[in-house]
Image (cartoon, rainbow, N blue to C red):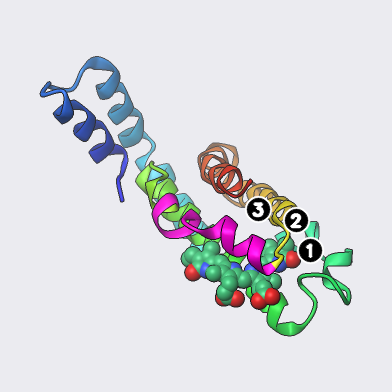
Amino acid sequence: MQDAITAVINSADVQGKYLDSSAMDKLKGYFQSGQLRVRAASAISANAAGIVRDAVAKALLYSDITRPGGNMYTTRRYAACIRDLDYYLRYATYAMLAGDPSILDERVLNGLKETYNSLGVPVGATVQAIQAMKEVTAGLVGADAGKEMGVYFDYICSGLS
Ligand SMILES: CCC1=C(C)/C(=C/C2=NC(=C\c3[nH]c(/C=C4\NC(=O)[C@H](C)[C@H]4CC)c(C)c3CCC(=O)O)/C(CCC(=O)O)=C2C)NC1=O
């Protein structure tokens, strides 16, 4: 995985150059938002189960998906869905702390769409649930940190679609 610092340094190194001013600006932005990221990550980890629960209530409960024939029907599949949402929340939090999405490609998105398609897990409903987590998370951590997290929730959604 990469983070905002290694991303900037690797790209300078490839060109055999010192960091230019746009690279320095990227680093400055990353360092300046450090406190915000750490604070958001601790609020999210203290409330992870509640975030997932609220997102499920907003996006999935009482829809056809939880009724017989729906992909979340049966306790086993319901639990698998909750577990998946918790993965998305946890990995989005890691990526937000790193300031870089590469961990999502490596550990979450790699092969995921194929797995969902082969099991009949509906991608559209999953994207809706991730968008609901984005809203619930922003409500918890505030607009600025919510926007940072939103980048990585959206990244997962576009990787799935
Ligand atoms: C850390 C990286 C990682 C991810 C992301 C991951 C996802 C993942 N979700 C799965 C299943 C599943 N995922 C869902 C999810 C849903 N169904 C719905 O209708 C909802 C819309 C949605 C929840 C939002 C369900 C129901 C299954 C079980 C499907 C089945 O076995 O029939 C499976 C198949 C194996 C299993 O059941 O455990 C994988 C690999 N596994 C991983 O290791």
Q: Give the residues drawn in magenta, as a range.
A: 105-119
Res. 57 mark = 1
The earlier-in-sequence mark between 1 and 2 is 1
Would you say the magenta stretch is mainly helix, strand or loop?
helix
For residue 25, above or below residue 103 = above
Which disc is residue 125 wearing? 2
Give whichever of 72, 96 is nearer the camera: 72
Reply above or below: 70 against 90.
below
Q: Position of residue 45 (x, y in %)?
A: 49, 64
Which amino acid type is marked by label 1?
Ala
Q: Is residue 10 left or right of residue 160?
A: left
Q: How crowded is the residue under tag 1: few (<14 C-alpha within 10 Å), some, or many (20+)?
A: few
State if disc 3 and disc 2 touch (CB < 8 Å). Answer: no
* 115 falls in the magenta region: yes
| Quarter of the view holding residue 86 | bottom right
Q: Tell whether position 58 is magenta.
A: no
Question: Counting other residues with Cα less than 10 Å from the Cα at mark 3, is it few (<14), some (14-19), or many (20 or more)?
Answer: many
The structure residue drawn at horizontal position 39% and vertical position 52%, both measured from the top left corner, is: 103
Question: The residue under label 3 is which amino acid type?
Answer: Ile
Q: Residue at x 69, y 55 (%)?
A: 123
Residue at figure coordinates x 53%, y 45% from the top left: 149
